[in-house]
Amino acid sequence: MAISTKASAGAMAEINVTPLVDVLLVLLIIFMITAPILAHKIEVDLPQPNKDVIPPSNPPSPINLKIDQSGAFYWNGTPVDELGLKAQLAVIGQQSLPNQPEIQIAADDHVAYEYVARVLADAKSYNLVKIGFNEVR
């Protein structure tokens, strides 16, 4: 058994770079895989301003549509079922664009998104363009 003794018993000053390179290569591979996923674009259909439409001098009062936690609809405080809601939306959709009242949707925080999505889809199918969102009071 050979024991080597050096004159200076100080710390070893060499750095082993192999583990460092291994870690950097793993990080590089992870970033190469996740970068295309993070750069995926989502198309959003934003409304464009229409400068040809002149706002009416006496705009109609907005309609408050409340959706409670159970998914029940309230049209200006009056309970209405889904068929009644569609009928109301159809009546509003027949009005000309500047005279359409704004539908202000106030959905409860715990309501399923399905109910809000159905209302938005119905409003779109009846060509309603003035839709807003309010807080539930």
Image (cartoon, grey):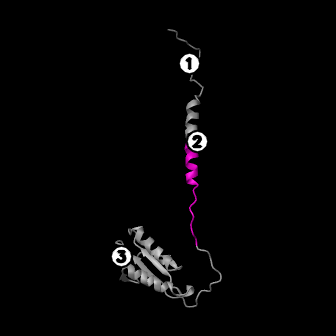
Instruction: Give the CA separation, mark 3 to mark 2.
Output: 51 Å
Q: In the image, what residue occupies the spot 61% across and 74% down?
A: 48
Q: For the residue marked with disc 1, what is the amino acid?
A: Ala
Instruction: Give the CA separation, mark 1 to mark 2.
Output: 39 Å
Classify 10 Å Cα crowding around label 2: few (below 14), some (14-19), many (20 and above): few
Q: In the image, what residue occupies the spot 48% across and 78% down?
A: 123
Extreme residue toward the left, this view: 70
Callout 3: SS: loop
Callout 2: SS: helix
Tell me if 72 is positioned left or right of 97 in this view: left
Q: In the image, what residue occupies the spot 55% across and 44% down?
A: 30
Q: For the residue marked with disc 3, what is the amino acid?
A: Ala
Tell me if 110 is positioned left or right of 21 in this view: left
Residue identifier under label 3:
72
The part of the image, by quadrant, that contains residue 114 is bottom left
- The percent position of residue 99, horizontal first and vertical second, equals 54, 88
Mark seen at residue 9: 1
